[in-house]
Image (cartoon, helix red, strand yellow):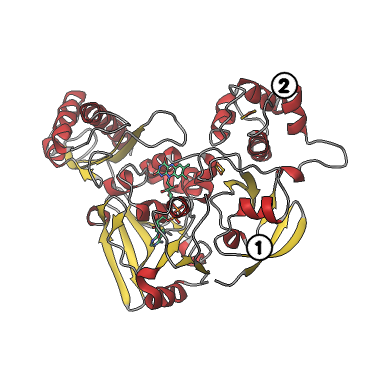
Amino acid sequence: MAAKLVQLTINDKEYDIAVQANETLVDVLRYRLGLTGTKKGCGQGDCGSCTVIMDGNTVNSCLVLAVQANGSRITTIEGLESEEGLHPVQKAFIEHGAIQCGFCSSGMILSAKNLLDKNPKPTEGEIRSALSGNLCRCTGYQKIVEAVQSIAK
Amino acid sequence: MLLPKFDFDEPATVSEACEILAEFGAKAKVIAGGTDLTVNMKKKLLSPERLVSIARVPELQRVDASSTMLKLGPCVTIANIAESGEIGKRWGAICAGAKALGSPLVRNRATVGGNLGSARPAGDMPPSLMAYGARVVLTKKSGQRVVFLDNFFRGPGLTEIAPEEIMTEIQVDAPPPHAGAGYINLGLRSSCDCNIVNVASYLVLEGPGGPIKEARIVMGCVGPTQRRAVSAEKALIGKKPCEALFTRAGEAAMTDSTPIDDFRGSAAYKKEMVKVLTRRTLAAAFEEALKS
Ligand SMILES: Cc1cc2nc3c(=O)[nH]c(=O)nc-3n(C[C@H](O)[C@H](O)[C@H](O)COP(=O)(O)OP(=O)(O)OC[C@H]3O[C@@H](n4cnc5c(N)ncnc54)[C@H](O)[C@@H]3O)c2cc1C
Ligand code: FES
Ligand code: FES
């Protein structure tokens, strides 16, 4: 069970890293690269706290083998802030009180960003559906939906 | 939850993948999107010595809806099927199944071949594919065979796929004129749940308005594998389609189903829902048949 060399482009930075076949992408991000903005809740695809954007699509990084991500472009929550400050979706979440404990926020914000990139004017139904793989135990979702709607307008 | 240790291969072609499976047999397991397999491995229900990833084999990712047969690569993602206009135009119930599966996150990784390969009695793709009469092509180093989905599932988690075989294509004939299909799944919420009951129906009419020439009704969650509602199908043949007929077919489907009591619902409730979903999917199939 030799380690495999994989190449990942994470938040526009290239990484060459030797991983074991049984390491998941979320564990590589968190434990090998220190990118702890990506959270790990259930580890089995149910909660969405491990959401990252991989080659343009949101995925549960706890279900992706790091070896299967070889060659991919990945955006994590750390990649959203720019020189101009926080990403508009991050700002909207703060302004609308859409963050409480924050454990779901990285995944929620990445799912919202990916939706808005593909569909800049989603309906409320489309927003709720796009966020339906991301669970939040604190906010009751209403403020999250309102935050996304505030940018969609 | 950590994954047990395993070796990993990422063949570039089907023949390369078949070589590896021929060598390692039951010690190896194919992985596509991994949304079913990795969870089972984390729960230590399975621990194959070797995973053979077919997710990046280009020939397994093709969709060809141009002729009289839909040819679906097993590694096409559920998200791509859900959004596919060309599949939706002639095989709408397949898209309905894809839209009902998991969450957007899961759909972006999950594949149709993986959904069939995981052989869950509550799976969202088998009912409509079976209702359209789909077949799968199973390939190994020494040859190929074609298996009807009706004969593919062997029990929960068990299929016809032998350890050295890979599913390399899913084939679905285009419905003839005056045909239609419908799929409905009942769950507790609209995302990321497990179905309580799911049903797909397919009808072919003699001409506009009927009578019914061909009928296939497939029920999920009511037995160890998906089931055809045989007596309900019989009750439909030769008859003029109408609500009353669909209700009678729904009642017949109840007798074709053998659900069990579990935390998702009682057997009695599931039977009742078989009746309702059979009636509703038949009505949806009829409506589509009138338009086609
Ligand atoms: C949170 C969550 C929610 C889910 N919700 C649903 C749901 O609502 N409905 C539903 O039906 N499913 C659901 N699933 C289950 C799963 O996502 C689907 O069954 C999915 O389609 C599996 O595809 P995959 O590519 O990820 O399969 P994998 O995990 O890669 O493989 C599954 C099985 O199929 C075999 N296999 C895959 N491809 C092939 C091939 N080409 N040839 C031979 N064998 C093959 C593998 O060896 C394995 O045994 C859910 C899963 C999660 C984690
Ligand atoms: S940690 Fe990945 S979905 Fe919960
Ligand atoms: S803010 Fe606590 S889980 Fe969403």
Q: Residue at x 39, y 28 (%)?
A: B188
Local SS, label 2 = loop
Q: Residue at x 24, y 38 (%)?
A: B222
Which labelled disc corresponds to residue A71?
1
The image shows residue A66, relative to residue A133, as above or below, that is below
Of residue B135 and residue A16, the one placed in the foreground of this image is A16
Q: Quadrant of residue A1?
A: bottom right
Of residue B124 and residue B285, the one placed in the foreground of this image is B124
Of residue B196 and residue B179, the one placed in the foreground of this image is B196
Whole-number angstrom distance, CA of label 2 to CA of label 1? 37 Å
Q: Are marks 2 and 1 in contact (CB under 8 Å)?
A: no
Residue B284 rendering spot, x and y as whole percentages: 31, 32
What residue is shown with label 2? A96
Residue A38 rendering spot, x and y as whole percentages: 67, 44
Amino acid identity at mark 2? His
In the picture, measured across the screen, residue A43 lies left or right of residue A121, that is: left
Of residue B177 and residue B165, the one placed in the foreground of this image is B165
Chain letter for the residue marked with disc 2 in the picture = A
Residue A20 rendering spot, x and y as whole percentages: 59, 64
